[in-house]
Amino acid sequence: MVPPIRAPETVQEQNLSATKNEFTNPYATKIPKESILALFPNEETWKTVSTAARQNSRFHKNNIMAQILYLSCLKNCVLPELIQRGNLLAQDTFPFSAMPQVINDNQRAWISWAVSLDETIANALKQLNWLELLEKEYESAKSLWTSFWPLHQEEERQKAPCPLTDQVMPLCATLAELEVVYEKLAGHNRRRLFLQTKMIQGKDWVARLLEMVPPWIEWEEVVRAMLTAGTGGQSQSNGAAGEPEGGVVEDMEDEEQFDL
């Protein structure tokens, strides 16, 4: 017997949970079971994903803090030298016009980096604050998740054919508790999306922490080369000025010998 042909579902009849998860909806008033199980099919999957997320968050936070401390220390080390070099250039001891272009460009690059670092660190610290708030939000929602899984298992068990004596609580009571969990998860989800949005908006500041700093060029070799070049030019000038005097003396000696 040929089964009856069923008309395709209309758009209104289609199950939207298959294409849209309420975890992505900041205006959701509750997170239904279908959305939860689409991300976490079972409790073990949730535990694995949750543990990995917390570990990655701590690792990311520690990396940001370490980079901030490193760059702050670097700035404190090079800033006195940058100021001294700037004074030498401003006082015409080693004027910009006399210094190689690569030295001038390097000095400007370091000054620009040092000036912008404070703003970069201030905004990166804001990112750390959002990250810490997100970690606290996940921690506060942990009790909701640990409540959901036993209730979900109880609901599934009660729906399965079983003796009435095996039921722990009436199905209606289980469903009522689950509804409370779904609503509280929606509140957690709104806060989560807000914090994650803030972190995405400021991710460029964290990226700036990882940018390469300008190469450090030692001035000692450059200045020594400049002084050596200047001394060599003066020696050549002095030698060229002494040659005519020596020639006149030799001519006078030759004339005296000729007279004798």
Image (spheres, rainbow, N blue to C red):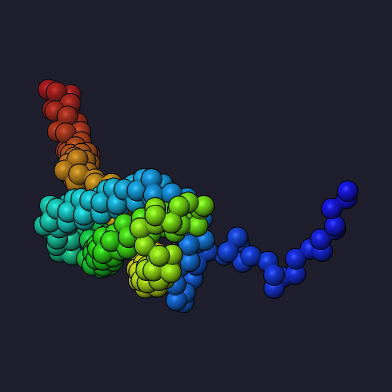
Q: Is residue 83 visible?
A: yes
Image quarter of residue 120: bottom left
- Which residue is at 25% across, 51% downward? 58
Q: In the visual, does 259 lie left or right of 39?
A: left
Give percent across and percent down for residue 229: 22, 41
Q: Position of residue 237 (x, y in %)?
A: 21, 42
Above or below residue 5? Residue 51 is above
Residue 89's spot in the image, x, y percent?
A: 19, 60
Displayed quadrant of residue 75: bottom left
Q: Quadrant of residue 170?
A: bottom left
Image point 31% across, 48% down: which residue?
51
Residue 128 to residue 73: above or below: below
As drawn, 124 above or below 65: below
Q: Residue at x 17, y 54 (%)?
A: 69
User: Is any part of residue 149 visible from this angle?
Assistant: no
Q: Quadrant of the C terminus?
A: top left
Residue drawn at 47 percent across, 51 percent down: 162
- Name the foreground residue: 48 vs 228: 48
Q: Say which of 260 and 71 sits in front.
A: 71
